Image (cartoon, coloured by chain):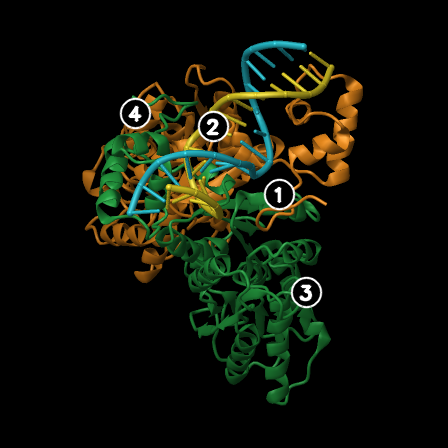
Chain colours: A green, B orange, C yellow, D cyan
DNA sequence: TTGAAAGCGCTAACAC
DNA sequence: GTGTTAGCGCTTTCAA
């Protein structure tokens, strides 16, 4: 009957050692798959662990210099399905690697908050960090780099080549969607950007512009509004676009959530989707099939991005001296019901 | 220049002690707001911590018998906005209490997985647990109770009076929505349940039935379909309801996500919302205003539920011998565009 | 009020 | 192949 500290009926490595009639170091070896243990001892220890219902105390393990088996996930918020999808991918990988996840949201703190998190995180709580679409990341990326703390950026390609990042072919995605609209006969295509401090936002805009150029259309600055990835902004920008003297016949929003705002605005003006205005989004979050009409959008393989980033992080934790990897997963235009050929 | 172990440039309590010319025990006292420290010593220590950029190592702290300052959040998945809203509330409270959060999802494991989490969680990693809408919870609630490990259930009122839980007035919500539909003139009102192993699902159904009875309408079992809180099931159930010989003029789904599935099904049959079929959901997740027409729904104060549960958990951690609290926050019918009076 | 010392559960040399 | 011994950074008696 092992004595417990607080709540936990904690069976420790020492109890197991006692039960298996070995030293606690040997138990540790077995637990860490050290090869220098005789098969029969290993067997005996393993039996003892199950008999006693032992489970390792991660805090102690990581204090002693081992891994914490925890990674930190830093996100703005969990608002939309966007993060949910990414987490699905992360989660899968983590569970097979026997890792747990700490969740850090930054939505309330505004600037500065993130860096507080990150430094305290790097304090040993976690073995590595996954940063989803970080806002003004330079403030703390610096710190992480200095400490050689493993991290991978998701959907944001950092400032240089020096960091590992997984993203999608944002430029191509922007290009494809715009080209598609052009081929449907649209000539005046409104564009709503994401937060312009993010590389992915700039890339999508670039793709839009490139497609326009390649098809001999000029770039009208009036058709480009600066958004922020949130629905209200999609609404506002769309309102502005729709009240232009020469109203666009199609609007391409830099993410699905803003596209929902566009839908609202279009209806607000008693216009029909897609008859009067075609709408395209970006991301393909689960909600894009819940709305009506179902949204034509550029799919990002979000779950896969999460999974890939996690694999990369795990490798980085294993071997921190690895060179940075930069992965771009392909986007795909998903045509649904919010777009149609111009009359 | 403190020496670091792994990545962290870790300034420890010893470094601070040295700098402040006191023992590390005194530093610990200051850090833990122990009253037996002279104001001037405290001041000196505090200055040293900031000068050195010290930040406490939670692992060590919790190993030594203190709090881990981490709570665990156990959810099925992050799929919809539902969890996102709850987390917003949790997060707020946690940040003011200086707590961090571990996220445990159970979506992949199916049965049994949750209990594995929970036991390993209770192993000292976290100070307490928040369980959102847990599936078949009896398997591990038992364990938690035995160990007297603090936990609070969210949106699920446990098996007895013995556990702390925060939910909403589900029965009343079900009643209100149904009553509203009846007052609009609807007589045949379809109902899609949630997972019936959950108390909240049963309560919503009860409210539906009670409203019917109170208004002299009989309960037609054919109008009640068993759902599971997911969109595809909403679609399927709605299809069944709509192909009934005497088709319902309104459908009340036990959550918003299923209501979206209902919308799909209604359109699939070339019927109009709300002209041919009125639709009501439950939850009021953010998406319910993104869909068209905007969804009439029973609002649960999700963020508030998260916040309240967190406060309760924190109190429970402070004083585990407290009696269990059971809180029901009020729901509110939010009338939007998916419902109308019958012709 | 403060310091010394023990120990939380574990890993990682270092012996044997 | 296995045991012994030191810590990891902290909290917490127990003395002083």
Secondary structure under the numbered disc 4 in the rendered image: loop
Q: Position of residue A201 (x, y in %)?
A: 62, 67
Q: Earlier in the sequence, mark 2 or mark 4?
A: 4
Checking the image for residue A120, the label placed there is: 1
- Which residue corresponds to mark 4? B159
* Residue contact between numbered discs 3 and 1, judged by CB atoms under 8 Å: no
* Residue contact between numbered discs 3 and 4, judged by CB atoms under 8 Å: no
Q: Which chain carries label 2?
A: B
Number of numbered labels in the structure image: 4
Q: Check chain identity for marks 3 and 2: say if they share one.
A: no
Which residue is rendered at x = 46% and y = 65% of the image? A295
Secondary structure under the numbered disc 1 in the rendered image: helix
Q: Earlier in the sequence, mark 3 or mark 1?
A: 1
Q: Where is residue B255 in the image (x, y as percent from the top left)?
A: 38, 43
- Which residue corresponds to mark 2? B330
Category of crowding for the residue at label 1, using alpha-carbon neighbours closer than 10 angstroms: few (below 14), some (14–19), many (at least 20):
some
């Amino acid at each position: 009957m092992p004595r417990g500290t607080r709540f936990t009926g904690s069976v420790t490595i020492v109890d197991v050692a006692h039960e298996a009639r070995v030293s606690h170091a040997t138990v540790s070896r077995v637990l860490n798959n050290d090869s220098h243990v005789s098969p029969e001892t290993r067997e005996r220890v393993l039996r003892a662990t199950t008999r006693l219902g032992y489970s390792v105390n991660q805090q102690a393990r990581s204090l002693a210099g081992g891994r914490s088996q925890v990674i930190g996930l830093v996100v703005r918020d969990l608002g939309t399905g966007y993060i949910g999808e990414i987490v699905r991918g992360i989660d899968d990988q983590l569970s097979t690697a026997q890792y747990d996840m700490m969740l850090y949201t930054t939505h309330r703190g505004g600037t500065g908050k993130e860096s507080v998190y990150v430094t305290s995180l790097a304090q040993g709580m976690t073995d590595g960090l996954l940063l989803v679409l970080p806002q003004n990341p330079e403030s703390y990326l610096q710190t992480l780099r200095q400490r050689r703390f493993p991290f991978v950026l998701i959907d944001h390609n950092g400032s240089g080549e020096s960091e590992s990042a997984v993203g999608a072919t944002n430029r191509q995605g922007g290009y494809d969607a715009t080209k598609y609209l052009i081929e449907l006969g649209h000539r005046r295509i409104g564009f709503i950007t994401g937060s312009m401090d993010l590389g992915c936002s700039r890339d999508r805009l670039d793709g839009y512009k490139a497609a326009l150029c390649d098809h001999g259309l000029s770039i009208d600055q009036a058709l480009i509004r600066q958004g922020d990835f949130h629905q209200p902004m999609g609404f506002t920008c769309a309102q502005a676009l729709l009240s232009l003297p020469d109203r666009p016949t199609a609007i391409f929003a830099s993410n699905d959530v803003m596209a929902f705002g566009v839908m609202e605005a279009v209806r607000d003006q008693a216009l029909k989707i897609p008859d009067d205005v075609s709408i395209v989004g970006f991301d393909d979050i689960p909600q894009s099939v819940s709305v009506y009409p179902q949204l034509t959008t550029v799919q990002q393989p979000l779950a896969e991005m999460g999974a890939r980033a996690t694999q990369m992080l795990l490798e980085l934790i294993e071997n921190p001296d690895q060179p940075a990897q930069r992965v771009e997963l392909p986007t795909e235009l998903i045509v649904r019901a919010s777009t149609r050929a111009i009359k």
